[in-house]
Each structure stands twice: as C-alpha cells, then as structure tokens.
Image (tube, helix red, strand yellow):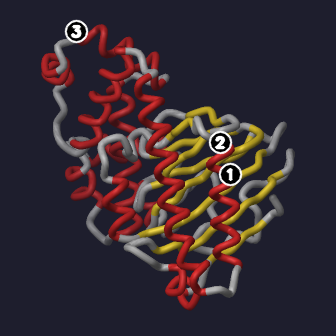
Amino acid sequence: MKVFKRYIGSEIKDKTEEFGVQILNIGHNIHPPNKKYPDEDHPKGYYFNWEKGRYLKEYQIIFISKGKGIFEGNGLASQKIGPGTIFLLFPEMWHRFKPDPNTGWEEYWIGFNGDYVKYLLEKKCFSAENPIINVFFIPDFLEIFSNLITSIETEDPLQRKMASFHLINLLSIAYASVLKQNNGLSHKKQIIHKMQNEIHKNWNNTIDFERLCKQFDVSYSWFRKSFKEIFDTPPNQYLILLRLRNAARIIQETNLPISQIAYECGFHSEHYFSRVFKQKMGLNPTDIRKKK
C-alpha cells in the first residue's frame, strides 16, 4: 500500500459520517530506522515528544504491520510492540510510543468518534487499561483498511458513506482478536488483569491491596509477585505512577491549586506529592503548569 496521510477537515468529515461514526484522520506510513519519531509533518494537535507524551480527544486504532517498538499509556509499564499489534487509544488517555531506532516500523492509523463507536468500545473486552491487541486476522484487517482509504479518497458520496462500515468491520476484527487473545490468557493473567481494572477504577481513592486480594481470593504475596511478573513493576509503584500521570493531566488542564490536585489524586501530603512527582516525572508540578 502506498504511504497515505489524511487529517480530515470538517467538510469531508461530514460526508464520511454515517450511523454514529465520525472518521477524523487516517493514514499509512513507513518510518525508516534511525529517524526522529514522530515525523515533523504531524499536525500540531497530534504531534508529541517522548518526554510529555500525548492526550487525544478521540479514539484511535494504530496498527504496526512491520518493525518493532514500545508503547506506554495510562500508568502501564512499557509494552514491547511487534508486527501484527494494535494499540487502541481512548479519549483523554495519556500515551506515548515510538519505533525501535534499529528497525523503524510500518504503521496504519485511524482516528474516530461517534455515539455508536462509543457504544462498541464500552464493551467489557475493550479497556484503556489493556490497550494492546494482537491481531489474529491480519490479511482481513489490511484489506479492510485499504478499502477504507479508497472510500476516503473517492469523490463518490455513496462510497464515502461506506467508510463508516469499513471502520465498524475493523472494530469487529479487533473485538474478535481480543476474545481470542483472552481465551489464550493463563488463569493467572486473567485474575491479575481483573485486579488491574479495579485499581484503575479506584485510582484516586485509598486502595487496600489486602482487601482487594480477599475480593479475588488470592494471597497478597501471590498478587504482588504475579503483578510484577506481568507488568514489570510492583502494584504500589504502578498505582503511584498512575496517580502522577492523572495529576499531570489535571495540572495541565485546570488552574486548581497543586495542594488540591495532590489530595484529589490520592496524596495526603503536598510535600510528598511534589517530591515523588519530581522523582518520577522529571519536573516539578509547577513546571508542568508553566509548560502548559
């Protein structure tokens, strides 16, 4: 497939919007080894640097067909990305990703919104806490993506309306891949992922890990060891990083006092919050606001 990038203006978005689906951008790019990522021609609202990461107002599917790299999002430990991998981005989800400089990668992406899309992605199998999906039906995925680009490029209004159907088909492949992926998870991973979801639901409240373990009928030592094995970080450190990244988002998006943000994000001391924030994020909370 040729390299193709399109960030759709409102006049085209209206023509491709159908059945509660709005396509906002779509593209295919081959990023070569040893080149800065992302490309400089990314639009302002989508470009990001590794240190700050990025938030979007939309859903995105990003599919890596060749090469390898890493992905980080929502307090997750760094995830290795290989060929045949999707990362599913949710609105207001902090994230960052980049290819391995030795390999580069080939990527496909589509950004979208809409009531029907929201309904589909609120299904239990999809979550911002587990955004990595291994695609089990790659030829079908690439064929549908090719049809999607054809629909976007055409001047035929009927063909443009087909773009919504192609996107829904992509989500169907992602859904089927998640189900197949979950069926292949060990019993240990299934339990840990459920416990991880509980942590994300209650990230700004006091979380009693001992009580959480009783809820899932496992010992704390088993939970801590298994969690670190899967996410490469202990659960308490995972929770702290999750709170800090949410705090960084609130600092950037509001003018609330730092002390209030610290308290609302689960820290009972502004001094401790500021010290840990500097240690983990590389900047003071006030510096984040200045760079807003």
Marks 3 and 2, how far apart at CA: 40 Å
Question: Mark 3 or mark 2: which is in front?
Answer: 2
Give the x, y percent position of residue 131: 47, 43
Label placed on residue 142: 1
Marks 3 and 1, how far apart at CA: 44 Å
Q: Between 140 and 219, which is closer to the camera in this rendering?
A: 140
Note whether 131 is above or below 118 in the view shown: above
Q: Residue 42: name its quadrant.
A: bottom right
* Residue under the point 55% across and 55% down: 61
Mark sitting earlier along the chain (3/2): 2
**Dots 2, 1 in contact, CB < 8 A:** yes
Q: Is residue 143 left or right of residue 281?
A: right
- Amino acid on which disc 3 is placed: Ser
Query: Label 3: how many residues lie within 10 Å, few (<14), some (14-19) or many (20+)?
Result: some
Give the x, y percent position of residue 102: 84, 37
Badge 2 marks a residue whose secondary structure is: helix
Query: Label 1: how many residues lie within 10 Å, few (<14), some (14-19) or many (20+)?
Result: some
- Amino acid on which disc 2 is placed: Ile
- Residue position marked by numbered label 3 in the rendering: 219
Question: Mark 3 or mark 1: which is in front?
Answer: 1
Q: Between 255 and 30, which is closer to the camera in this rendering?
A: 30
Decide if residue 279 is in sight here.
Answer: no
- Residue position marked by numbered label 2 in the rendering: 138
Decide if residue 109 is in sight here.
Answer: yes
Q: Between 164 and 89, which is closer to the camera in this rendering?
A: 164
Give the x, y percent position of residue 159: 61, 78
- Amino acid on which disc 1 is placed: Leu
Label placed on residue 53: none
